[in-house]
Image (cartoon, rainbow, N blue to C red):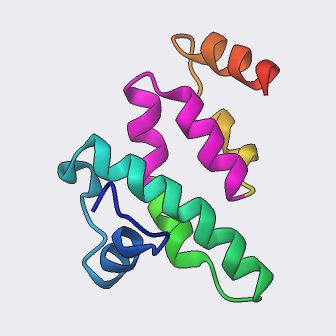
Amino acid sequence: MVASDDDKPDCLTYCLQGSKLNLVSWGHEYLRCLAGQIGTQYQSRIEKSEPVDDILSLVDQIIPEFINHNEEAEAVDLLMEVERLNKLGDFCNKNNYERVCVYLLSC
């Protein structure tokens, strides 16, 4: 599922049909795949004026996992894709703020 041949959001579709609980237990690659599909689907839904609350709830689970595993760049990218960069401050601390700032400056 992580390396699908087409651009279908299968990973996200099945995730949204499931319990949406404990996404972290599915593993890092799953979260990365999910994050990529969330970004694409978010833009598509916005253009069609469709609700995005369900995918934003997934973002709230994914971001802490990325931040806690030194993947600030992925967290920043996902927050930018879903237009929620203002939430980044909630996840920054003395251990990661420098990496976050450096990445933001390089964008």
| Residue 70 location, quadrant | top left
Magenta segment, which residues?
Answer: 61-82
- The residue depicted at 58 percent of the width and 77 percent of the height is 53
Q: Is residue 32 magenta?
A: no
Q: Position of residue 20 (x, y in %)?
A: 31, 71
Instruction: Tell me the residue at 50%/77% (across/down).
Output: 54
102 is higher (above) or lower (below) than 45: above
Asked whether, in this view, residue 63 is left or right of residue 83, the answer is: left
Q: Residue at x 60, y 60 (%)?
A: 39
Question: Residue 31: horizontal and vertical position, in percent?
Answer: 36, 50
Q: Is residue 77 magenta?
A: yes
Q: Is residue 23 above or below residue 50?
A: above
Task: Name the spot of residue 22 as percent of width and height, x first.
Answer: 24, 58
Q: Identify whether 24 is placed above or below 94.
A: below
Q: Is residue 56 above or below residue 102?
A: below
Picture mark count: 0
User: Image check: 80 left or right of 96?
Assistant: right
In this view, the residue farthest toward the left is 25
Secondary structure character of the magenta stretch overall: helix
Image coords of residue 6 (percent x, y):
44, 69
Q: Is residue 11 left or right of residue 53?
A: left
Image quarter where the C terminus lies is top right
